[in-house]
Amino acid sequence: MEDTLARSGDDQEVAALVGRLDQRGPGTVRQRAMRASGASGGELAAALAGTTLGGCADPSGSSSSAPRVRSEATAVGIGLAAC
């Protein structure tokens, strides 16, 4: 599989994504940690939306920055995902 990824030019991206997963852990672990810390449903939803949309270009063409995850989410390791 590594050879196929290298031929298609995707090997470095896949390695970076797997490395990030190893570092941050799976999403379910981060979500459970956030809920255990007392985050409200709204805070959890905002963090999940920010993680999903983070790093994505604004489809409207606006130069505003991507949505940011609230500090409660960052405290338990929920970061921004790349598109």
Image (cartoon, grey):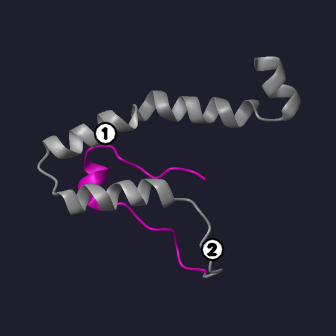
Residue ID for mark 2? 59
Is 9 located above or below residue 22 in the figure? Answer: below
Please name which of the two marks, 2 or 1, marks the residue nearer to the observer.
Answer: 2
Q: Is residue 36 left or right of residue 22?
A: left
Total marks in image:
2
Residue 77 belongs to the span the image colors magenta = yes
Callout 1: 10 Å neighbours few (<14), some, many (20+)? some
Label 2: element kind: loop
Q: Are marks 2 and 1 in contact (CB under 8 Å)?
A: no
Residue ID for mark 1? 30
In whole angstroms, how far apart are the C-alphas of marks 2 and 1? 27 Å
Callout 2: 10 Å neighbours few (<14), some, many (20+)? few
Q: Is residue 9 left or right of residue 78?
A: right
Who's the residue at 27% across and 59% down the image? 71
Prevailing secondary structure of the magenta residues: loop
Range covered by the magenta-colored residues:
63-83
Percent from the top left, x then y, of residue 48? Answer: 37, 54
Percent from the top left, x then y, of residue 14? Answer: 66, 32
- Mark 2 or mark 1, earlier in chain: 1
